[in-house]
Amino acid sequence: MVDEVDERFITDTVGNGHPGVDTTARDRLESVATVVQPPGRSPNPFDPSAPNCQDWLRIYVQKLVEEGFIAGSAISVVQNAPRLL
């Protein structure tokens, strides 16, 4: 687990149990996620130095720490996780 988040920062929306696509940030955590650019398509998907989703998560966690939503210790949890292709 990376960290616990205070429930005041999270908004649960009522759903119908079916998968869907939602592009509207519904709470403060999702708002932070919208400013972190996702990695683009790599010309070589097996290049270990190419940006990937794990890089996106690391930047997102850093932003959450900067905004005060989670503790700084979460950064080391993400940094120490194995990097996978």
Image (cartoon, rainbow, N blue to C red):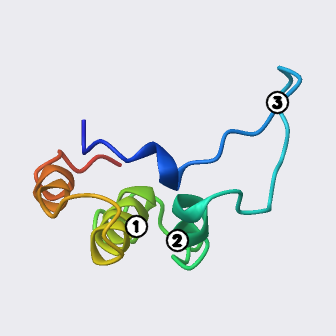
In what element is the residue under mark 2? helix
Packing grade of label 1 (10 A; few <14, some 14-19, many >=20) is many
User: What residue does disc 2 label?
Assistant: 32
Left or right: residue 78 versus residue 36 is left
In what element is the residue under mark 3? loop
Give the mark, 3 or 2, whose residue is nearer the N terminus.
3
Left or right: residue 68 versus residue 74 is right
- Kind of residue at badge 1: Tyr
Q: Are marks 3 and 2 in contact (CB under 8 Å)?
A: no
Q: Position of residue 74 (x, y in %)?
A: 19, 55
Left or right: residue 27 versus residue 2 is right
The answer to which quarter of the image holds residue 63 is: bottom left
Name of the residue lying farthest toward the front = 8
Q: CA distance from mark 3 to mark 2?
A: 23 Å
User: What residue does disc 1 label?
Assistant: 60
Q: Which mark is residue 19?
A: 3
The residue shown at (35%, 62%) is 69
Q: Are marks 2 and 1 in contact (CB under 8 Å)?
A: yes
The residue shown at (39%, 47%) is 6
Above-or-below relation of 69 to 22: below
The residue shown at (15%, 50%) is 77
- Kind of residue at badge 2: Val
Packing grade of label 2 (10 A; few <14, some 14-19, many >=20) is some
In what element is the residue under mark 1? helix
- Kind of residue at badge 3: Pro
Give the mark, 2 or 1, whose residue is nearer the N terminus.
2
